[in-house]
Image: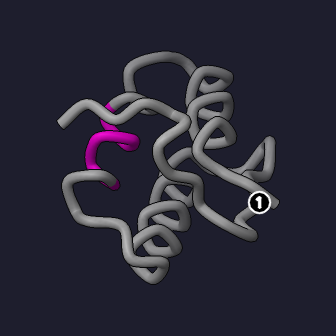
């Protein structure tokens, strides 16, 4: 399932630069599921975020996040 970054945003979730990548992904996943995202939506974002380096991970997670 391909999801454009404008379709859904995770509300009130901060992505901290310098945090361990696994912690960032776990926190994002947990928060998204609590906010009603489907498992497929979460997996899509995680797959996209995991394709590049650390900065790509941060950029991707922040693209799906609103504070």
Q: In this orientation, which residue lies closer to the viewer: 61 or 25?
A: 61
Around disc 1, counting alpha carbons within 10 Å, would you say few (fewer than 14), some (14 to 19), or many (20 or more)? some
- What's the residue at 52%, 73% (across, down)? 31
Residue 13 horizontal side relative to residue 1, left or right: right
- What's the residue at 34%, 55% (across, down)? 42
| Residue 59 locus on image (x, y percent) | 67, 28
- What's the residue at 66%, 34% (across, down)? 58
Find the magenta span and give its range: 42-47
Reply yes or no: does residue 44 show up in magenta. yes
Q: Is residue 23 above or below residue 3?
A: below
Residue wearing tag 1: 14
| Residue 67 locus on image (x, y percent) | 82, 60
Q: How many marks?
A: 1
Residue 34 sits in quarter: bottom left
Secondary structure mostly taken by the magenta-highlighted segment of the chain: helix
Q: Is residue 38 above or below residue 57?
A: below
Q: Is residue 43 above or below residue 49?
A: below
């Amino acid at each position: 399932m391909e999801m454009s970054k404008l379709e859904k945003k995770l509300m009130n979730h901060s992505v901290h630069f310098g945090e361990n990548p696994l912690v960032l992904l776990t926190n994002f996943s947990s928060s998204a599921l609590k906010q009603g995202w489907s498992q497929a939506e979460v997996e899509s974002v995680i797959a996209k975020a995991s394709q590049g380096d650390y900065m790509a991970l941060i950029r991707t997670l922040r693209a799906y996040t609103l504070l």
